[in-house]
């Protein structure tokens, strides 16, 4: 397994699915041939198990090795509203105004062929029905009229176990975090198992998951055995570990994370698109993993 943590504009503990190249399956020695020899369905099954697990039983390598780069604890976000006095305030802005909640969400990426962001089908040159996306499913589970923001917009087939979502709802009702969580779990996306809501906490009114995120963590699972159970020879885990160690702490350019004036500045080789790779590791995990 390969892991890296980086400082970026997004956070969501997104778990990119392995890619499967298309091409000539009968050409030994090609990259396509090498990748297709391995049973990627085992990786898919592993993430399916992880997304559906009780959070308290997640393996240590999923949870994270320390409290800084690990599964997000929403209680820390909730605590900001308590310590800051907002939740106990009698100011009408907070007492009767809109309320913000933070949710930790998981999803099975292989159930979403179009990724996170809501979009419409333009395959015939004009807009048609909306495509099935994670954001569409989340929106369907939230109270009517609520606005949502995600810490990260994952690509197609990417799974997650700690995607943080912020929602803002009108203040005319006394909706609680427990009510939001209970109602969301009754909706079809959750009943099907493709979407999971692990936790929901009230957050400060100004909290926005997209704007507040400062890092994101990726986990890549690669099968070490082929479909016949033979150990692959083209991936040296200790060597990959050495390679990753050499890039730890390096500020690297990530143009895709910049936008607007920042993107223009990035093209002028400014530092606005620079992110730091805080941690990178390569190690073996057992497919029949034990809980943490």
Image (cartoon, helix red, strand yellow):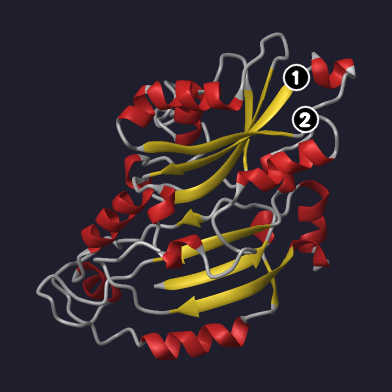
Is there CB contact under 8 Å for labels 2 and 1?
Answer: yes
Q: Residue at x 70, y 15 (%)?
A: 170
Q: Give the image location of residue 33, x and y in percent.
A: 21, 73
Is 222 drawn above or below residue 259 in the view shown? Answer: below
Q: Is residue 43 left or right of residue 216?
A: left
Nearer-N-terminus badge (2/1): 1
Q: Is residue 277 above or below residue 292?
A: below
Picture residue at 13% right of the left edge, 76% below the top: 229
The residue nearer to you, when weighing 114 against 263, is 114
Give whichever of 280, 196 is nearer the camera. Answer: 196
Q: Is residue 206 visible?
A: yes
Position of 44 relative to 131 (above/below):
below
Report the residue marked by disc 1. Answer: 98
Q: Residue furthest top?
A: 172
Provide the secondary structure element on which disc 1 rests. loop
User: Seen from this angle, which residue lies furthest left?
Assistant: 228
Element assignment for label 2: loop
The quadrant of the image that shows the C terminus is: bottom left
- Crowd tier of the residue under label 1, counting other residues whose Cα lies within 10 Å: few below 14, some 14–19, many 20 or above: some
* Residue at x 43%, y 29% (from the top left corner): 121
Number of callouts = 2
- 271, 69: nearer the viewer: 69
**Residue that carries the numbered disc 2 in the rendered image:** 205
Percent x, y for residue 128?
A: 43, 21
Q: Position of residue 221 (x, y in %)?
A: 36, 67
Q: Is residue 286 left or right of residue 5?
A: left
Residue 120 in view in this figure: no
Q: Residue at x 36, y 45 (%)?
A: 108
Instruction: Determine which quarter of the picture holds residue 96.
Output: top right
């Amino acid at each position: 397994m390969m892991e890296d943590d980086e400082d970026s504009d997004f956070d969501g503990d997104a778990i990119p699915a392995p890619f499967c190249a298309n091409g000539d399956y009968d050409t030994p020695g090609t990259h396509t041939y090498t990748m297709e020899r391995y049973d990627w369905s085992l990786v898919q099954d592993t993430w399916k198990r992880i997304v559906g697990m009780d959070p308290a039983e997640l393996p240590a390598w999923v949870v994270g090795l320390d409290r800084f780069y690990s599964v997000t604890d929403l209680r820390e976000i909730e605590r900001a509203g308590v310590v800051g006095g907002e939740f106990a305030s009698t100011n009408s802005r907070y007492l009767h105004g809109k309320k913000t909640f933070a949710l930790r969400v998981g999803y099975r990426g292989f159930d979403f062929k179009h990724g996170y962001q809501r979009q419409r089908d333009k395959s015939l040159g004009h807009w048609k029905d909306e495509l099935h996306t994670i954001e569409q499913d989340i929106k369907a589970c939230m109270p009517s009229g609520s606005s949502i923001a995600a810490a990260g917009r994952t690509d197609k087939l990417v799974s997650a176990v700690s995607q943080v979502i912020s929602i803002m709802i009108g203040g005319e009702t006394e909706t609680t975090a427990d009510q939001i969580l209970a109602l969301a779990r009754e909706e079809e996306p959750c009943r099907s198992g493709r979407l999971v809501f692990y936790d929901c906490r009230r957050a400060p009114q100004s909290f926005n998951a997209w704007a507040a995120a400062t890092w994101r963590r990726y986990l890549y699972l690669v099968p070490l055995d082929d479909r016949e159970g033979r150990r692959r020879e083209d991936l040296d885990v200790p060597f990959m570990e050495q390679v990753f160690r050499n890039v730890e702490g390096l500020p690297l350019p990530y143009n895709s994370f910049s936008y607007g004036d920042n993107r223009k500045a990035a093209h002028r080789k400014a530092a606005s698109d620079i992110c730091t790779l805080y941690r990178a590791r390569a190690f073996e995990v057992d497919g029949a993993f034990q809980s943490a």
